[in-house]
Image (tube, rainbow, N blue to C red):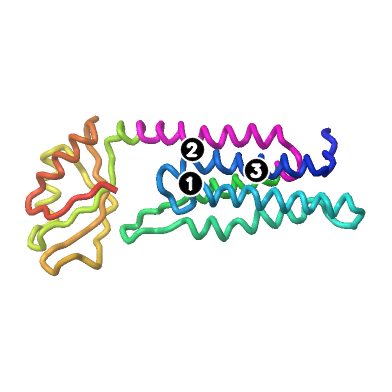
Amino acid sequence: MLELRALTIYELLIRLLLSCVIGLIIGLERGKKNMAAGLRTYMLVCLGATIVMMTNQMIYQSGYAGDMTRMGAQVISGIGFLGAGSIIVTRRNQIKGVTTAAGLWTSACIGLAVGIGFYEIAICGAILIFLIMTLMDKINQITRERSNSLDVFIELKKFQSMSTLAKHLREQGLRMRNLQVEEAVPTEDSIAFLVTISSIEKRSRESILEDLHNIPNLLYLEEL
């Protein structure tokens, strides 16, 4: 087992600077995508968790009775308010911000590791988190491109019947499921809904979208 590193002035500076650098690295990917929780948020979360853990270590080593991990545990649970605030459900029932919330939570965990002087796990964890946020995002995009099922928002003229739409889709080798009609529509002369469109045969997403744009009386189409 590793022994606790003494809290010298140099050790304090190393931990504080390292937590800022790691927070910066983790927040790079979110910052590039212009997310609400970007570089500064990640740096502050990681730095704050580091400060809490160092404070807990100082109290423990000063001879005060208590659990050395208690303050760190409060950080893990307390970071939930930031995570909850970054997750939103759009008016079209899209859930956004889950990855950002998970990144904030892991950033706090890394900060705790730095704060207690466990540099090895902090650096390795930061590298893995950065790789997950960057490389896995590209893999996710490739997987989505190869999928023949997609969620779309469709707005049609109100006199367009759903049976006519279903017939058109069948003729194109497409089928729909999870139909959800929107209560609020842009105009009284239109009907809007969310639906999952899938192809019976293996096709590209571009081909499916091209057929969807040919739906009779289509006013608006958006892939979600």
- Kindly identify which residue carries mark 1: 99
Type of amino acid under label 1: Thr
- Kindly identify which residue carries mark 2: 133
Crowding at mark 1 (Cα within 10 Å: few <14, some 14-19, many 20+) = some
> Residue sitting at 24 percent across and 36 percent down?
205
Q: In the rendered structure, which disc, 1 or 3, sits on the residue that comes first in sequence?
A: 3
- Of the two numbered discs 1 and 3 in the rendering, the one whose residue sits closer to the viewer: 3
The magenta region covers 114-143
Mark 2 → mark 3, Cα distance in angstroms:
18 Å
The local secondary structure at tag 3 comes to helix
Q: Per the image, is 199 magenta?
A: no
Up-down: is 9 above or below 65?
above
The percent coordinates of residue 197 (x first, y second) are 24, 44
Are the residues at dot 2 and dot 1 in contact (C-beta closer than 8 Å)? Answer: yes
Residue 19 disc label: 3
The percent coordinates of residue 41 (x first, y second) are 54, 52
Up-down: is 186 above or below 75?
below
Q: Per the image, is 122 magenta?
A: yes
Q: In the rendered structure, which disc, 2 or 1, sits on the residue that comes first in sequence?
A: 1
Type of amino acid under label 2: Met
- Between 13 and 159, the residue placed more toward the observer is 13
Query: Does 12 sit left or right of 212 as displayed?
Result: right
Are the residues at dot 1 and dot 3 in contact (C-beta closer than 8 Å)? Answer: no
